[in-house]
Each structure stands twice: as structure tokens, then as C-alpha cells.
Image: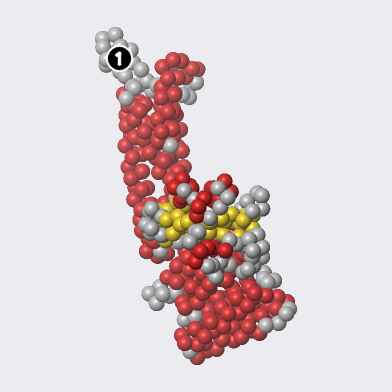
Amino acid sequence: MAVGALLLALAMIYIDSHFGSEWMDGLLWLYAARPDGARSLLSSIGGSMIGVAGTTFSVTIAAVVYASGQYGPRLLSNFMSDRGNQVTLGTFIATFVYSMIVLRTIRSPGESGVDTLAFVPQLAVLVAMVLVLCSIAVLIFFIHHVPMRIHINSVIEQVGERLIVEIDNRFPVFVGEPREEAHDDPRIPPAFRLDAPIEAYERRAVVRSKDTGYIQLIDEDRLIQTAAKHDLVVRLQYQSGDFAHHGSVLAEAWPADQVDEDVVKALRGAFALGSRRTALQDMRFLIDELVEIAARALSPGVNDPFTANSCLDWLGAALSDLARRDLPSRLRADEDDALRVIAYPISFAGFVDRAFGALAQYASADMIAGKRFLDAIGDVALSCDDPDRIATLRLQVEAFKELAGGSLAGANLLAVQDRADQLLLALAEPDYQRRLRDSPAWLGGTA
């Protein structure tokens, strides 16, 4: 925006210098500015804009510090990348840059010589006034935007909505075309089997990391294309969000005699590492953000179960959406239907454990959050048709009931255990979905 303001100022000065300001004489309500008045006006605009920009930046930093302390430092990236804050700062700085560029072109009579005429870029000054009005509007927006942005419900909503969008974007296809998988699938090379003989094992070629950090991106197309070009099968050892250090084996390729330094370099180039996790390909990061907010809310120093309930609602919504989708096999094929990539396995149980399993120890110590925890699992069960996934949810409920028994007592424990028993009883029946829908204690908002 600052560069755009610079180009706009140059364009306005060019128009004023070549076409003049005679057109203003025909507008009685619009008076041409004199050099001293134009200088004073632009100086005031520039000084006030840089002052307001500094204040705005201070408010933004204060909001970031507050959010970091209240919700967790991993949410800092959400605030730093907020488009509203960026546009606000950009508008003030751009107006300042525009005013300074136009200001230096104003000349009084005889300022640069005896015969020098006065020059005031009237159209450029008029545009400066328009930018001031835009800046005032942006300031009003910013005053409203910051409190709304740091409100806990807004923070949770933004993370939850992005998680649901990522689920919709990433499943059911992940890398290449998914293939049906069996433990003894003949398409898996002998070198990548659990019972691989030493001769087959030695035919693996390893791709080691040269950097240390979190895997932020895996170039899926590059892996498939490289493997197809050299007739390889590549097995990934990491997924996005994992931490890898220098020398870690990012992937293994088979057969080794077809892997040279150029192939290793191409495969290594499919992995991008950074100093922090991002949500670009890592849905677990978004789940962890919701879990972190809920865990902080349930800590003894905060004791805010209703914030935790909001996180559980969004986690339940995301996993309900995931429960209706087919997760891809770890075996991925190219366009010719040849196995090329064995990806890191993705399972519904893994996501459930990442969300509910991580929060169980915190929610089990609070009756309000504990009941909502069980309601969220029941909501996910309503979207499940797979017996294995229902069994996963049952295990979570049983584990949660056991944790609650060691953390709660009296009426609070009875309330949570009663809700858990109702859910376990419903999930044990073939028509569990009807039983859950017919139960007013489930979807009636009693938590």
C-alpha cells in the first residue's frame, strides 16, 4: 500500500504538471489552494497520519500480547496475519507517504529562481483530502475491529471454521489417487514390509533432512512426479507438523540403485521446514489450538468452563464432518495406477485422540465441561456409520469416565458418570443414532 501511494502521488503530480488546475475555476464550491496553505495542509496530514499509525501499531501489539497470554502464543500468527489490522496500518502509512511526496513538489513564486512560477498540484492535494477521509473511516473500523477480533468467541470461531474448511479441502484425497490397503498388499515393495529380509531392506535409499525445524509443507505433486519419473516407490516418514532435525530420514525410496544425488535433492526439495508449525497442511495444529484454549480455560487460575465448552462445540463439529468422510489410504498411485508414495498413515482414531484424548484430563475435572465433552462425542457419533469409528468413540467415553472418577466427587461425579453411562448404553445398540436423537438430554442443551 505504501508503494501504491508513492506511485499514485507521482501520477497525480504528473497530471497536475501537464494539464494544470484550470478545471477548478469552473467549480464555485472548490477553491484552489495556495502554496503556503497546501504546505500547511499536507504537513498536518503527514504528521497526524504517522502519529495515528504509531498509536494503531501500539494497540495492535497490546492486543497481540493480551491474546498470547490469554489464549496461547500459537495464536499469534492469527493476529499478525489479520487482514483488517494490515489494511489499517497500510492506509495510515500510505497516506503519510503520499502527503510527503506531494509536499516536496509545492513551490512558491521565485522559490527556485527569479522567474520561477508557483506550482501547487491541486488535484494531488484534493486526492490527499480523500485519503484523509478514508483514513478516518478505517480508524473507526479499527476501533470496532480490535475488540471483536480478540473476543474469545471470535478467536475460537476463526480457528474452528478454518479447521472445517481444511477438512473439506483435504479429504478424501491427499496425495495422488488413494488405493485400497491391506496389511499384506502385494503392491507394497518387500523392502517396506514389516517382515522385510535384510537383502530387501538394504535396497532402500534414504532422504535425510539438511535443516532442523517443523515440516510446514510437503509438495505432493513433486513427490509423485519424481517417483514416477524414476520408477520409484517413496515412503514418507513424517507428515506436516512433525519436527525433523538435521540428519532425520524424511523419506525412503526403493529401489536404491535408481536413486542418485539429483533424485535425493528433488525428493528433499518436496519438504519445506520452518521454525514454527502452520495450518497450511497441518490440521492437527488447528486442533491443538482449540485444545490449548480449552486447557487454559479449565486451568485452576482461569476456571472458565464455558470457553472450554465453545472449543468442544467446534471440535465436535469438525470431527462430525470428518466422521462422514472417507480418509485416504496411505498407498498413493500416479496417473498410470502405479504405486508411487506410501504416505504417513492418517486415521480417524488419531484425530479423535488428538482432540478429545488431549482434553480429557482437563474436562474430567470439571462437571460443566465434562458433560459437554460427552455431548460432543455423542454429536460425533450421530455422524458415524462405521463400527470401528464407533468403537473408537466408546473407548474415549470409557477412558473419560475413569478419569472423572479420580477427579470429581459427589453430585458432580454422579452427573458426569450418568451422562457417560447413557452414551455408552446408546452406542452399544445397533440403532444408536436413533437413541441419541430421541434423548432430550443429548441435544437439548442441558450441559
Residue 199 in view in this figure: yes
**Height in image: 185 above or below 426?**
above
Where is residue 379, by image quadrant? bottom right
In the image: residue 226, left or right of residue 130 = right
Residue 237 in percent (x, y) is at 49, 61
Q: Residue at x 46, y 45 (%)?
A: 262
As drawn, 111 above or below 263: above
* In this picture, residue 432 sits left or right of residue 153: right
**Image location of residue 401, percent across then percent down:** 54, 84
Q: Look at the image and name its color scheme.
A: secondary structure
Question: Label 1 amino acid?
Answer: Pro
Q: Nearer the viewer, residue 346 or 434?
A: 346
Residue identified by numbered label 1: 109
Dot 1: within a 10 Å radius of its alpha carbon, few (fewer than 14), some, or many (20 or more) residues?
few
Quadrant of the drawing holding the N terminus: top left
Residue at left offset 67%, top offset 69%: 383
Q: Quadrant of the C terminus?
A: bottom right
| Residue at image location 42% in from the left, 70% down from the top | 296
Task: Please say whether residue 161 is visible from this viewpoint.
Answer: no
Q: Nearer the viewer, residue 173 or 225?
A: 225
Residue at the bottom extreme of this rendering = 410
Residue 309 image point, x, y percent: 53, 71
**Direction top: furthest residue:** 115
Residue 234 place in picture, x, y as percent: 54, 56
In this rendering, the count of numbered labels is 1
Look at 69% across and 71% down and name the residue there: 385
Residue reaching furthest front?
Answer: 199
